[in-house]
């Protein structure tokens, strides 16, 4: 006379472990096709020159820089342009 485990309710959703493909996509290990890439023959738009690091540091209030350092241990080191398509 053993005790049988309770049967799951029919209303409960079956949960399955994620597949390796799901995990790879979650962690960004799968490269997604980029349909909106620029054609090779088109020239890039004229971009403004980047400001110097000292100019950028002057724009950020001291309180903000102190909080960046305290909370994230982050300091400004370089100024560079990034592609907005690569930002998640």
Image: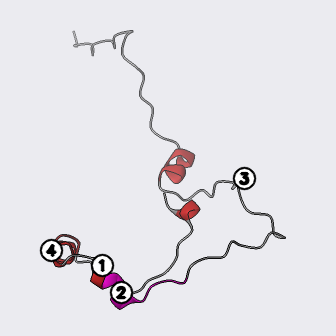
Q: Earlier in the sequence, mark 2 or mark 4?
A: 2
- As measured in the structure, the alpha-carbon distance from the residue carrying label 1 to the one carrying label 3 is 37 Å
Residue beneath disc 4? 63
Give the residue at x 80% y 64%.
39
Q: Is 86 above or below relative to 5?
A: below
Tag 3 near tag 4, CB within 8 Å: no
Q: Are marks 1 and 3 in contact (CB under 8 Å)?
A: no
Q: Secondary structure at mark 2?
A: helix
Q: Is label 3 in a helix, a strand or a loop? A: loop
Percent position of residue 83, x then y: 57, 68
- Residue 2 or 30: which is nearer the viewer? 30
Nearest the viewer among 83 and 7 is 83
Q: Is residue 56 magenta?
A: yes
Q: Are marks 3 and 2 in contact (CB under 8 Å)?
A: no
Which labelled disc corresponds to residue 35? 3
Q: Are marks 2 and 1 in contact (CB under 8 Å)?
A: yes
Residue 45 position (above or below residue 3): below
Distance between the alpha carbons at the discs numbered 4 and 1: 12 Å
Residue carrying label 2: 55
The residue under the point 35% across, 82% down is 56
Position of 74 with respect to 63 (left or right) is right
The residue under label 1 is 59
Query: Which of disc 2 and disc 3 is earlier in sequence?
Result: 3
Q: Residue furthest right?
A: 41
Say few, some or many: other residues with alpha carbon within 10 Å of mark 2 (under 14 / 14 to 19 / 20 or more): few
């Amino acid at each position: 006379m053993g005790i049988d485990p309770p049967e799951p309710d029919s209303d409960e959703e079956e949960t399955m472990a994620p597949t390796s493909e799901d995990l790879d996509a979650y962690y960004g290990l799968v490269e997604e096709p980029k349909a909106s890439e620029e054609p090779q023959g088109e020239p890039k738009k004229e971009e403004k020159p980047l400001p110097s690091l000292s100019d950028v540091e002057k724009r950020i209030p001291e309180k903000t820089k102190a909080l960046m350092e305290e909370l994230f241990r982050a300091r400004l080191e370089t100024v560079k342009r990034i592609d907005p398509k690569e930002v998640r």
